[in-house]
Structures are given as structure tokens and as C-alpha cells.
């Protein structure tokens, strides 16, 4: 089941979203949402969640319940931190957090061993943690336009990497 509510003026996700237990895809891209409610935790069958181009400032710990999530896209928001709860999303293959205000890549990301695409460009990240070496299935890592001044040796462990973009640091 898919629910597509893109390009509306939605300002909040109602707690009643929890009633849609069979939802597989939820797309709320291009709205005015500022908060992801904890009720999202009930959507355990969700495989794709799109919340791009909103005004979201934080990812709630409730996200940890979405264990079947394959694709999580939160591009173009105002998120500053990636919570450790993200470590629970071990089925995640694609994570888009580009164009936010993220300052650090948490070690918890190392748990996402099925990740093939990680997009963190246009943030304020200053370092690549050694824990990134665990993401051996990664095919694309985009860290363009951040504040990274040193490349970690851990990158050498990413033997399946096809695309590594570290261009335009410090802009």
C-alpha cells in the first residue's frame, strides 16, 4: 500500500497515521512538516519513507521501529543530528540526508551493513569516522560540499564503492 501526499501544504503528520499498519510506502515530499511524530513507530511494514523538502529539524528515536525500511529519504530539511536509533534500520539500502545541517556521521551508521547508497552532501560534516569501514556494501558515498579536511583510511575498506564524491569541501 502506498500513500502519496506530495506537494501539499501539510504542516504535521497526524498521530492517526499509526492506524495505517499495512502501509509500505509513505511519501510526504514537498510539504511544510516540521516534526516526525512518534506514532510513525507503528508503521512497521514501511519499506520506503520519503520526507524530502520539508522543515524537519530532528529524526525521532521512534524511527528505530521501522526495521523493514529499505529506503529513507530526508533530503532538504533542517536536520542537525543523525540519531543512534538509526542503527536499528539494518535493512536500509539507501539513505538520503543531503542538504541538511548535519555536523557529524555517527558511529551508529556502521550498523547499516546493507547500505549501498549514502548521500550526505551539502551538510556541515567535518570528519569521516573510522566506523564507515563497516559499510562494505556501499556503492555510492556522496559527501560533496561539507567541511571535511581529512580523508579517513577507513575509505579503503569500501571495496564495492563505485562513486565517492568529496568535492567542494569548505564551501
Image (cartoon, helix red, strand yellow):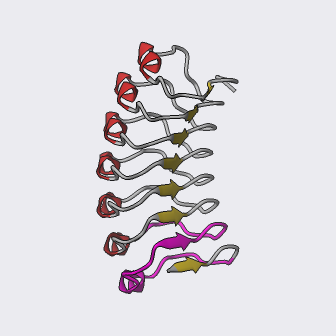
- Main secondary structure type of the part rendered in magenta: loop
Residue 25 painted magenta = yes
In the rendered picture of this protein, how many numbered marks are placed on residues? 0
Q: Residue furthest front?
A: 160
Q: Quadrant for residue 140, please give it.
A: top right
Q: Nearer the viewer, residue 62 or 142?
A: 142
Residue 156 to residue 163: above or below: above
Q: Nearer the viewer, residue 18 or 14?
A: 18
Q: Is residue 151 left or right of residue 154?
A: right
Residue 101 at x, y percent in the picture: 55, 43
Q: Is residue 3 left or right of residue 112?
A: right
Magenta region, residue range: 8-37
Residue 168 at x, y percent in the picture: 70, 24
Q: Quadrant for residue 11, please give it.
A: bottom right
Residue at position x 42%, y 82% in the image? 17
Residue at position x 45%, y 57% in the image? 70
Residue 36 painted magenta = yes
Residue 160 to residue 36: above or below: above
Residue 159 to residue 116: above or below: above
Residue 125 to residue 14: above or below: above
Residue 127 at x, y percent in the picture: 47, 23
Residue 82 at x, y percent in the picture: 41, 45
Quadrant for the C terminus in the image? top right
Residue at position x 41%, y 60% in the image? 69
Amino acid at each position: 500500500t502506498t500513500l502519496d501526499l506530495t506537494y501539499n501544504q501539510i504542516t504535521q503528520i497526524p498521530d492517526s497515521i499509526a492506524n495505517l499498519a499495512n502501509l509500505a510506502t509513505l511519501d510526504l515530499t514537498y510539504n511544510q512538516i516540521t516534526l516526525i511524530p512518534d506514532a510513525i513507530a507503528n508503521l512497521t511494514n514501511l519499506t520506503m519513507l520519503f520526507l524530502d523538502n520539508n522543515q524537519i529539524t530532528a529524526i525521532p528515536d521512534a524511527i528505530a521501529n521501522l526495521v523493514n525500511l529499505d529506503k529513507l529519504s530526508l533530503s532538504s530539511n533542517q536536520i542537525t543530528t543523525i540519531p543512534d536509533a538509526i542503527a536499528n534500520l539494518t535493512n536500509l539500502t539507501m539513505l538520503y540526508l543531503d542538504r541538511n545541517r548535519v555536523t557529524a556521521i555517527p558511529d551508529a551508521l556502521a550498523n547499516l551493513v546493507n547500505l549501498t547508497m549514502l548521500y550526505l552532501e551539502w551538510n556541515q560534516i567535518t570528519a569521516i569516522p573510522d566506523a564507515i569501514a563497516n559499510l562494505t556494501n556501499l556503492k555510492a558515498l556522496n559527501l560533496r560540499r561539507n567541511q571535511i579536511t581529512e580523508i579517513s583510511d577507513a575509505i579503503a575498506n569500501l571495496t564495492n564503492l563505485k562513486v565517492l564524491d568529496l568535492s567542494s569541501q569548505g564551501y
